[in-house]
Image: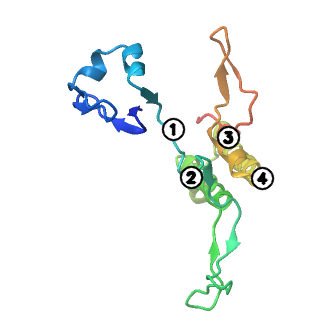
Amino acid sequence: MAFLLNGQPLAVDRPFIDPNTSVQYPANWLRLSSEEEKAAIGITWEPDPEPIDHRFYWDRDVDGNLIPKRLEDEPAVDDDGEPVLDADGVQIINRGLKTYWVAQQKQIAGTLLASSDWYVTRKAETGADIPADVLAYREAVRTTSGTREAEITACTTTEELAALLTNPAQVMDEDGEMVANTEPFITPWPEAV
């Protein structure tokens, strides 16, 4: 957020000189003056641009449009269009957002399953049964992971992927009640047992 005078930013609590009239203003003038007083000498307010979610976008172009990151994997090529090879002579693949986010789902699923892995180890070593609720939870985690991976893979644009991964499952309606979101959102993970 910035006050601008002739397109130049003005720092709050710093004195400034109006380049049109050569009038010097004290450090506290921006805080104490009214909007009308600021407008009278040509001071405008420019809000900060919307923040960039760097998980999905590189930055903004000169027109202020978001520059999306690559969605799909693609083979690496040099400036001449020739394949870029690794030390073994295999072409390098530049990973896209889908590959990254699918890998994240697999990692999250592994983390969620890790807390109950000891049941599986105990079953293998001693034959002791795994509780039914633990088995159901583990299956739900695996199923949810697959569903989330499919939802990510189905996205066709970076904007669609960003919305899928950032929209909440529930939103507040006009009455202050939590309701299911009508916008796309990724399938929530199951509740732990």
Residue on which the image places disc 3? 163
Residue 156: which disc? 4
Please tell me the numbered disc located at residue 64: none
- The answer to whether the residue labelled 1 contacts the one labelled 2, judged by CB atoms less than 8 Å apart, is no
Where residue 80 sits: x, y (%)?
65, 86
Residue 14, percent from left and from top: 22, 31
Task: Determine which residue is flagged by label 1.
Answer: 49
Which is more N-terminal, label 4 or label 3? 4
| Residue 39 in the image: above or below residue 108 | above
Q: Nearer the viewer, residue 80 or 124?
A: 80
CA gap between label 1 and label 2 equals 13 Å
Mark nearer the viewer, 1 or 2: 2
State the separation of the CA atoms marked 3 and 1: 19 Å
For label 2, the SS is: loop
Quarter of the picture containing the C terminus is top right
User: Label 1 is placed on what type of residue?
Assistant: Pro
For residue 62, the mark is 2
Q: In the picture shown, does residue 75 fall above or below 129? A: below
Image quarter in which the N terminus is found:
top left
